[in-house]
Amino acid sequence: MKDTSAYILNEVKTAIEKVDDSKVDEIVDAIIAAQTIFIYGVGRSGLVGKSFAVRLVQMGLDVHFVGDMTTPIVESNDLVIIISNTGETMSAVQTANIVRRIGAKVVSVTSSAHSKLGSASNIILEITPCRDEQRKKYAPLGTLFEVATLIMMDSLVPMLMARLNQNEGSLRRRHAIWV
């Protein structure tokens, strides 16, 4: 377990260090400028997206997860963030193409900037973990991408908090209380 944890932590750190800081700034600006924010992902990428959506809601932003029954229609002043490791997931690509036709902004978080999703996006946040043989042993399938994306999206939260004049107390007031 310790070898696996060390491998994952090291590879995730390496992947995040390669992220283009200017893209991070663009995404923060886009989130702040958006009327409504929509997030989409399938499988574990979707879970990462839902986790980020919770933080955005706690900052008082209007956020929806694409596919939920109560999700409204995307409009031209909106932002859609789509998470897909390969950038080839058919539903993710279709969502991006529909959103672009409407005139809303698409941010893709993917390991492949040159994918179909990348081509359909306004902003691409590329997170590229290694693809060596050890990955198959210690972090199968999309584990490194998903963990790196989770940390990357959580790393946007303090930037957004500062720009939106939020603090932990203001987030806590919007935190869901389950009784």
Image (tube, rainbow, N blue to C red):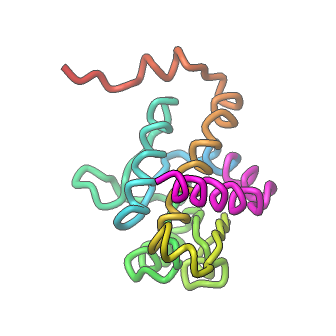
Task: Locate residue 178, reporting x and y percent.
Answer: 23, 24
Look at 66% across and 77% down and name the residue there. 113
Please say if 95 is above or below 81: below
- In the image, 53 versus 139, the foreground residue is 139
Please say if 21 is above or below 108: above
Q: Which residue is outermost to the left?
A: 179
Task: Locate residue 156, reporting x and y percent.
Answer: 64, 43
Boundaries of the magenta span = 1-28
> Is-magenta flag for residue 25?
yes
> Is-magenta flag for residue 159?
no
Q: Is residue 52 visible?
A: yes
Please identify the quarter of the rendering in which residue 46 is found.
bottom left
Look at 59% across and 84% down and name the residue there. 115
Query: Relative to residue 127, is residue 139 drawn left or right?
Result: left
Task: Locate residue 129, reporting x and y percent.
Answer: 63, 69
Please say if 61 is above or below 122: above
